[in-house]
Image (tube, helix red, strand yellow):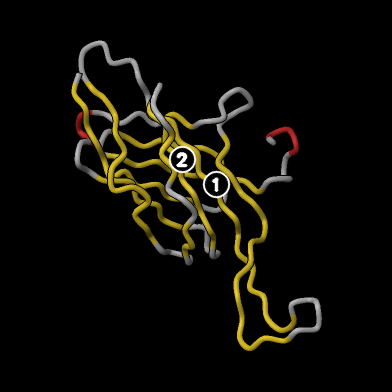
Amino acid sequence: MTRRSAKVVLENKTGAPFKMQVLHEYTGEDTDDSGWHMLAPGESKIMFEHVYFNTGFLTTGVDNWKVHGSKLVEYGGSDGKGIMFIGKLWIDGIPYRSWHGLLAQWKKHTLREEDEGEITLIEVHPSEVRFISPSGTSTTQWYALGEDAAKV
């Protein structure tokens, strides 16, 4: 068994400003949490300098992923209590998440030997999330919570 790592970059291809979080969990290990990051449309950010995974003989672990987001809404004028402020700010709007099926809360995109030291790119599009690494590409749905109550 060989311990390896890869860098993870998230790119916002939704066309809207978002606050996003990535969770990574290699089977049987603690969950890596990127924290929440604001991304403008077209912006990329490093979410993890290193996510760790194992390769080699009798390695049974897989890499599991979740992407959460909040579509940001531009707010200007009054705060609703009659207090005015100058300029504008972004507030959390519609919550989004990646979706992997009724029984699978995590998206499986297993990193391989050829991913060692390389970038795993997560592209978030208007209706899907793409995981792209040297070893391959996989996709899952990206949707607003409340669009389909069965997915919550």
Q: Residue furthest right?
A: 81
Q: How many marks?
A: 2
* Image point (44%, 43%), residue name: 33
The image position of residue 22, as x and y in percent, is 46, 45
* Image point (39%, 41%), residue name: 131
* Image point (67%, 60%), residue name: 93
Residue 11 drawn above or below residue 112: below
Q: Amino acid at mark 2?
A: Leu
Q: Residues within 10 Å of mark 2 (few under 14, many from 20)?
A: some
* Image point (67%, 86%), residue name: 85
Residue 9: image tag: none
Q: Residue furthest top?
A: 58
Q: Amino acid at mark 1?
A: His
Q: Marks 1/2: CA distance?
A: 8 Å
In the picture, measured across the screen, residue 77 lies left or right of residue 81, that is left
Give SS at disc 2. strand
Which of marks 2 and 1 precedes in the sequence? Answer: 2
The image position of residue 91, as x and y in percent, is 63, 67
Circles 1 and 2: CB distance less than 8 Å? yes
Residues 72 and 37: in front is: 37
Residues 82 and 64: in front is: 82
Give SS at disc 1. strand
Q: Quadrant of the N terminus?
A: top left
The image position of residue 25, as x and y in percent, is 42, 31
The image position of residue 9, as x and y in percent, is 35, 51
Identify the residue under disc 2.
23
Residue 100 drawn above or below residue 79: above
Identify the residue under disc 1.
68
Q: Quadrant of the C terminus?
A: top right
In the picture, measured across the screen, residue 113 lies left or right of residue 36, that is left
Q: Residues within 10 Å of mark 1 (few under 14, many from 20)?
A: some
Residues 5 and 44: in front is: 5
